[in-house]
Image (cartoon, grey):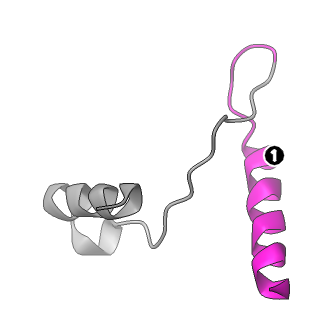
């Protein structure tokens, strides 16, 4: 069983079906600023770039 399947199974038994994420993205490191906060704008940019790459393939 892959990581996403295991995570999906955990979510299925823990939260309502309509609240489950539709997909999961695994990254090696989250982009952070100097204070250690996660840079959500950079995460969105990474997601958008990944989606564009998937659309081209």
Badge 1: how crowded within 10 Å, few (<14), some, or many (20+)?
few
Magenta stretch: includes residue 45: yes
Q: In this view, does 48 lie to the left or right of 11?
A: right
**Magenta part, dominant SS:** helix
- Which element type, helix, strand or loop, lies under badge 1? helix
Q: How many labels does the image show?
A: 1
At x 14%, y 60%, the residue is: 13
In front here: 31 or 18?
Answer: 31
Magenta stretch: includes residue 25: no
At x 67%, y 36%, the residue is: 30
In the displayed orientation, state which residue is furthest to the left: 13
Image x and y of residue 47, in percent:
73, 61
Q: In which quarter of the image is the C terminus?
A: bottom right
Q: In this view, does 33 lie above or below 41?
A: above
Q: Is residue 43 above or below residue 16?
A: above
Q: Is residue 17 left or right of residue 26?
A: left
Image x and y of residue 11, in percent:
26, 58
In front here: 47 or 39?
Answer: 47
At x 17%, y 55%, the residue is: 14
Q: Is residue 37 above or below residue 34?
A: below
Image x and y of residue 32, in percent:
75, 27
Residue 10 lies in what quarter of the image?
bottom left
Q: In this view, does 49 lie above or below 51?
A: above
Identify the residue under disc 1. Answer: 42
User: Which stretch appears magenta?
Assistant: 34-57
Q: Quadrant of the N terminus?
A: bottom left
In the displayed orientation, state which residue is furthest to the front: 1
At x 81%, y 15%, the residue is: 34
Image x and y of residue 7, in percent:
32, 55
């Amino acid at each position: 069983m892959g990581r996403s399947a295991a995570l999906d199974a955990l979510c299925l038994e823990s939260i309502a079906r309509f609240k489950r994420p539709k997909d999961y993205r695994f990254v090696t490191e989250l982009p952070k600023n100097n204070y250690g906060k996660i840079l959500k704008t950079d995460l969105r940019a990474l997601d958008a770039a990944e989606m564009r790459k998937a659309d081209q393939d």
